[in-house]
Image: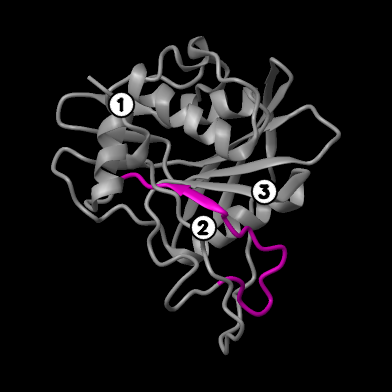
């Protein structure tokens, strides 16, 4: 199989100059540190919404300089014949120098669909938490997953009261039936070469260290990264 780089989705988001609506303040559970390895601190935190709480896993590198930020909308993709653990993907990007936050949940891709987009407020709050707790470079921010309406339409960047605001400069679209999103999802479901190609695209876009293919070992496993297991 030839992996062609043109299928990677890069989305540049426009900053809205006006916004009448305010931003509902974010609420979070107390974060807990659950591990440290390879120069990375692993933390758990909950995003508290009106009707639910969404767990998230965060990887923060030991570094003093500003580093890129990555938001991953789901922790797994379930395809018709295989599944991938997106915690492994985020772990690889963090080992290369990015801070990553992964929201718990699965993109159901047994039949291609557009049902996995996250609620805009959830994504905005996830980005806010990462900005507050990691030393991010605001010019190197990546979203991995369905774009949804976050950052456009009814939810422009950045709403009144939404500070700090995670404004992605680029996107690797997953879990969507458009040409790029579908192609990227199928690539991710074809490890190790597909996941590695996507990781190396992110490496180049964010200015990360070289991705070691071994960092993606086990991306097809159902279990979490070992020290993250609950």
Question: Which residue appears at 56% of the width and 20% of the height?
Answer: 211
Q: Nearer the viewer, mark 1 or mark 2?
A: 1
Q: Check the picture and name the quadrant holding the N terminus.
A: top left
Q: Residues within 10 Å of mark 3 (few under 14, many from 20)?
A: many
Question: Which residue appears at 72% of the width and 63% of the height?
Answer: 164
Q: Is residue 77 visible?
A: yes
Q: Is residue 148 above or below residue 170?
A: below
- 103 to the left or right of 2: right
Q: Image quarter for residue 37? A: top right
Look at mark 2 in the image and give the residue it sits on: 123
Q: Are marks 3 and 2 in contact (CB under 8 Å)?
A: no
Image coordinates of residue 18 in percent, x first then y, are 60, 86
Question: Which residue appears at 42% of the width and 36% of the height?
Answer: 75
Secondary structure type for disc 1: loop
Q: CA distance from mark 1 to mark 2?
A: 30 Å
Q: CA distance from mark 3 to mark 1?
A: 32 Å
Secondary structure type for disc 3: helix
Residue at the farthest right position: 64
Question: Which residue appears at 42% of the width and 62% of the height?
Answer: 119
Look at mark 3 in the image and give the residue it sits on: 130
Q: What segment carries the magenta color? A: 157-175
Q: Does the magenta segment cover residue 19?
A: no
Q: Are marks 3 and 1 in contact (CB under 8 Å)?
A: no
Image coordinates of residue 9 in percent, x first then y, are 39, 47
């Amino acid at each position: 199989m030839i992996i062609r780089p043109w299928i990677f989705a890069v989305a540049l988001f426009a900053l809205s100059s006006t916004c009448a609506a305010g931003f509902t303040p974010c609420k979070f559970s107390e974060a807990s540190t659950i591990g440290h390895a390879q120069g990375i601190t692993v933390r758990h935190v909950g995003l508290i919404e009106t009707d639910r709480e969404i767990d998230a896993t965060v990887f923060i590198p030991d570094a003093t300089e500003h580093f890129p930020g990555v938001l991953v909308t789901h922790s797994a993709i379930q395809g018709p014949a295989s599944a991938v653990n997106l915690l492994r993907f985020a772990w690889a990007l963090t080992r290369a120098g990015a801070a990553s936050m992964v929201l718990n949940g699965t993109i159901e891709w047994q039949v291609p669909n557009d049902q996995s987009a996250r609620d805009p407020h959830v994504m905005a709050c996830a980005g806010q938490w990462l900005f507050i707790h990691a030393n991010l470079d605001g010019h190197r921010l990546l979203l991995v997953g369905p774009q949804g309406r976050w950052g456009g339409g009814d939810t422009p960047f950045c709403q009144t009261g939404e500070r700090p605001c995670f404004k992605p400069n680029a996107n690797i679209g997953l879990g969507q039936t458009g040409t790029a999103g579908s192609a990227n999802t199928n690539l991710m479901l074809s490890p190790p070469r597909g996941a590695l190609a996507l990781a190396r695209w992110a490496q180049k876009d964010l200015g990360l260290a070289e991705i070691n293919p071994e960092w993606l070992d086990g991306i097809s496993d159902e279990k979490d990264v070992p020290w993250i297991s609950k």
